[in-house]
Amino acid sequence: MIKSYKKFWGDLFNFHGTATRSNYWWPIIINYLLGGILVSIVQAAIGHPIDDIYTLTDLNISWISEIIILLVWIGMLSVSIRRMHDSDHSGFWILIQFIPIIGTIWFFILTLFPSKRNRWDSRY
């Protein structure tokens, strides 16, 4: 679990190669849990939602949260593309999520496929 999460941050801008199922799912689970916990803590500390900006401190907190969200989004994009590579699909399969409901379900199914020999993995 920790190894997969470290690999997620280490390969933040790596859009080549592969990501096993555990290297894909652990960071997703951990990021959602950490995100929810951190947002709750910050909102409790400042006394209002992060999106509400009343002071310069609120603006700084908002900017910092937006930068963190961008970095996590880039990491999720790269690990999703690498997950598609690991199941021997093109990274462009992530675009199927733009099809409402069915595309999201189909992408979820694609992430569950086992690893295959593929052109992106140097292990084979």
Image (cartoon, rainbow, N blue to C red):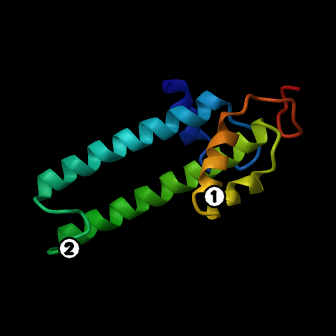
Q: Identify the element where label 2 is drawn.
A: loop
Residue at 42%, 61% (x, y): give it: 67
Residue appearing at x 59%, y 47% in the figure: 12
> What's the mark number on residue 97?
1
State the separation of the CA atoms marked 2 and 1: 32 Å
Q: Residue at x 20, y 62 (%)?
A: 49
Q: Would you place residue 48 above or below residue 9 in this image?
A: below
Q: Secondary structure at mark 1?
A: helix
**Dot 1: few (<14), some (14–19), or many (≥20) neighbours within 10 Å?**
some
Q: Is residue 2 above or below residue 43?
A: above
Three-letter code, disc 2: Ile
Q: Nearer the viewer, residue 71 or 25?
A: 25
Discs 2/1, front: 1
Left or right: where does residue 72 sit relative to residue 97? left
The vertical placement of 66 against 30, above or below, is: below
User: Does the rendering let one see residue 17?
Assistant: no
Residue 87 horizontal side relative to residue 8, left or right: right
Tag 1: amino acid: Gln
Pointer 2 residue: 53
Residue 15 pos. (x, y %): 71, 50
